[in-house]
Image (tube, rainbow, N blue to C red):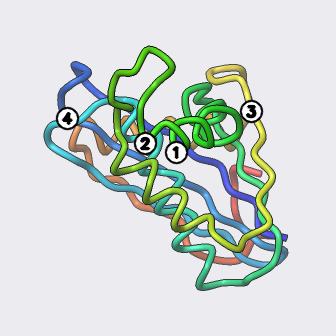
Amino acid sequence: MITIYTDGASRGNPGPGGWAAIVMDEVKVAELGGREEHTTNNRMELMAAIKALEYADKLSDGPVEIYTDSEYVMKGITLWVEGWQKRNWRTIAKKPVLNQDLWQELLKVSEDKKIEWKYVAGHSGHKLNDRCDEVATSFADDISMPLYHGPRDSYKHL
């Protein structure tokens, strides 16, 4: 089982943004993060999930659980995306789906995977969610920070 935590941040919305993910299996933990100059919070939330699943794919083809504090990502992937596809990427109001490119990428990296999507309340004292927030906001603020890659039993945020 691979466990993933994700978060995204944007300064200005749109503005500079960052995404973060923690990907772990039974023995290893990897923190991931990235930055875009002009983006939105929702795009960074989606990017975090995409990059985490791409990374997880290199580790295992087993089941994955993803924790997100984004209701947009959670509802989008579990409730809305099927309808968007049936309506040719239109909302119920017949407007184009925002971030269609990233939704399509998320579907692509999710293909043939057993994924359980789980919602975690943001800023609620959950250590791994808080760490993702710290990494994502650091990238959004263009502040360099070391990312952990190593043994799970040495990871201080568990």
Q: In the rendered image, which residue does mark 1 sit on? A: 85
Q: Name the front one of labels 3 and 2.
A: 2
Which three-letter amino acid code belongs to the residue tagged 1?
Answer: Gln
Q: Which mark is residue 16?
A: 4
| Residue at 68% from the left image edge and 44% from the top image edge | 128
Near-viewer residue (119 or 99):
99
Mark 4: secondary structure? strand
Q: Name the front one of labels 4 and 1.
A: 1
Q: Could you tell me how far apart the alpha carbons at marks 4 and 2 are, in whole angstroms?
A: 30 Å
Measured as percent of width and height from the top left, residue 51 is found at 47, 62
Which three-letter amino acid code belongs to the residue tagged 3?
Answer: Tyr
Measured as percent of width and height from the top left, residue 52 is found at 55, 62
The reply to whether dot 3 and dot 2 touch (C-beta < 8 Å) is no
The reply to whether dot 2 and dot 1 touch (C-beta < 8 Å) is yes
Q: Name the front one of labels 4 and 2.
A: 2
Q: In the rendered image, which residue does mark 2 sit on? A: 88
Mark 2: secondary structure? loop
Q: Name the front one of labels 3 and 1.
A: 1
Q: Could you tell me how far apart the alpha carbons at marks 3 and 4 are, in whole angstroms?
A: 25 Å
- Considering only order in the chain, which callout, 1 or 3, is on the residue closer to the N terminus? 1
Measured as percent of width and height from the top left, residue 81 is found at 58, 40
